[in-house]
Amino acid sequence: MYAQIRAREIMSRQVACIPADATVAQAIDLMMDRRISALPVTDRDGQLVGIISEGDLLRRSELGTERERPRWLQYLLSPGRLSAEYARAYGRRVDEVMTREVVTVGKDASLAEIVALMERHQVKRLPVLCTGRMVGIVARADVVRALAEAMRAPTSAAPRRDAAIRCDILAEFVRVPCIPAAQISVMVLDGVVDLAGAITDERERSAVHAAVGTVPGVTGLHDHLILIEPLSGEVIFVPDEAARQEIQQEVRPGEAAPAANASTA
């Protein structure tokens, strides 16, 4: 369901914009007044021509934070880049300091496309265009709100058979490449999952727990997975005392038991 959500469904339609010929001081006042971190910039025809954000205002001469490069490095950089940096530090108009290359999306863009663009371009918001005109803006907060609604969505309360739950867990383990499915055994009783076996990286434990949590009908989880150093085979973490004693009993007489941390997971 939520994978089909489009930009038009989560975007903010009342977008504060600022004209390109406005002053930087006016832009700052508007951002502070609206408690937002960026403003789309429009020309006299209302067309999107850029965006001004807090990031564009970090290196300012008024703060003494303008970028200062060694003279020899300035000779290696293009005049255009140096000019843009100077204008951003000393410019008084919005169009002198704004970012002109704006990443945008269409109103029918999916959540997957929106998130991919935000990650690829390291931006926090995307103006939404329709026939060349801006009709809204999607910010990270809008994506998080969609996530909150998805997590609050009611799930099936119908009880499931333990065998079906176990089958789904095993299928998810196999589907996720980072989970060592062959090293983990799964038992389910009255919806409570018991895991036994071994992992070779503690981060795998979080993935295993997350995979179990995706399966409907799970009501609890008991983790007995031990952590083994992959090169030496040394047991370096055992989640409970009972499992630690069991491992020690498997050691042959006269043979030193492997080191184990008996802390509770």
Image (cartoon, rainbow, N blue to C red):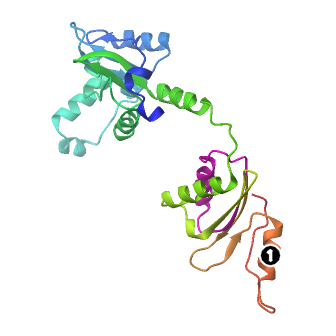
Answer whether residue 176 is visible to the viewer in this image: no
Q: Is residue 93 left or right of residue 220?
A: left
Instruction: Examine the rendering and report whether any part of residue 88 can be seen.
Output: yes
> Percent from the top left, x then y, of residue 153?
59, 30
Q: Residue at x 44, y 35 (%)?
A: 3
Residue at screen point 59% across, 68% down: 200
* Neighbour tally class for label 1: few under 14, some 14-19, many 20 plus, Cα within 10 Å: few
Residue that appears at 24% across and 42% down: 71
Res 6 quadrant in image: top left
Front residue of 183 and 159:
159
Name the residue: 25% across, 25% down.
100
Q: Is residue 106 left or right of residue 8?
A: left
Work out which residue is located at the far top of the displayed protein and give it: 44
Horizontal side of 19 relative to 241 (left or right) equals left
Residue 254 image position (x, y, % from top left): 80, 93
Relative side of 142 to 151, left or right: left
**Position of 34 relative to 214 (above/below):** above
Residue 253 versus residue 77: which sits nearer the camera?
253
Q: Is residue 194 above or below residue 140?
A: below
Element type at marker 1?
Answer: helix
In the depicted structure, whether residue 248 falls above or below residue 143: below
Decide which of 73, 226 is in the foreground and name it.
226
Q: Amino acid at mark 1?
A: Glu
Q: Position of residue 41 (x, y in %)?
A: 30, 15
Residue nearest the observer in this picture, 265 or 123: 265
The image shows residue 147 at horizontal and vertical percentages of 53, 32
Count of numbered labels shown in the rendering: 1
Image quadrant holding the C terminus, namely bottom right
Q: Assess whether residue 152 is covered by the magenta stretch.
A: no
Look at the image and give the residue range highlighted in magenta.
195-220
Judging by the rendered image, the residue that carries numbered circle 1 is 246
